[in-house]
Amino acid sequence: MNLTLSIGQHSMAPNMPELRQVSGEHCESSFVLRVIGPLDHAAARELVEKIQAEFSGGRRGRIVIELSQVTFVRSSGIGGVVQISFDHGLRVAGAAGDVKKTFELAEADRIVRFEVDLETALSSFG
């Protein structure tokens, strides 16, 4: 028996992990992290590790997490984003549809500033 669960745009079939990618780059005076695929515990851990490597020694920075290609969000992913916001200037860019709605239901949008796209997020730091 093959069971497939569908949640929003995400389809999760047993034994078929979804592709996940987290990459980082400097853009203007900010560090931009792009997440592709699920924003779950593993992706959140990878985000935190990349930020720790980039901002070693307790340095703080401007960070944008770009989520336009995220397929779904788990609570651990939201927790990772909120954790990052406590230590750095943070904007989340490109979250839309079910992804943005999930952050809103968790009331994370009260803690983290969301912008419609990367350009707006970068310029919002002033």
Image (cartoon, rainbow, N blue to C red):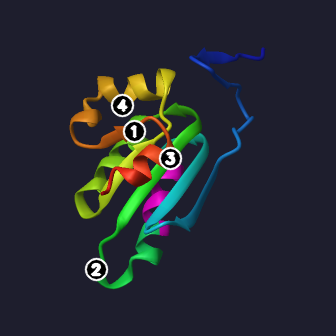
User: Quadrant of the rendered structure where residue 5 is?
Assistant: top right
Membership of 72 in magenta stretch = no
Secondary structure beneath dot 4 equals helix
Q: Are marks 1 and 2 in contact (CB under 8 Å)?
A: no
Name the residue type under label 4. Answer: Phe
Task: State whether residue 41 appears in this view.
Answer: no
Q: Point out residue 122 in the picture as x, y percentages from the top left corner.
A: 43, 54
Q: Which residue is tagged 2?
A: 58
Q: Earlier in the sequence, mark 1 or mark 2?
A: 2
Q: Main secondary structure of the magenta part?
A: helix
Can you say whether 34 is above or below 17 in the image? below
2 or 3: tag closer to the N-terminus: 2
Q: CA distance from mark 1 to mark 2?
A: 26 Å
Image height check: is 110 above or below 112?
Answer: above
Q: How many marks?
A: 4
Q: Residue at x 52, y 57 (%)?
A: 33
Residue identifier under label 4: 103
Q: Does the segment drawn in magenta span residue 43?
A: yes
Image vertical order of residue 13 relative to residue 61, above or below: above
What is the magenta range?
42-50
- Residue shown at 49% from the left, 40% from the top: 117
The location of residue 57, given as percent across then percent down, is 32, 85
Residue that badge 1 annotates: 115
The residue that appears at 38% across and 36% down in the rendered structure is 75
Q: Residues within 10 Å of mark 3 (few under 14, many from 20)?
A: many
Mark 1 vs mark 4, foreground winner is 1
Residue 52 falls left or right of residue 68: left
Whichever of callouts 1 and 4 sits on the residue coming sooner in the sequence is 4
Question: What amino acid type is highlighted by mark number 1?
Answer: Glu
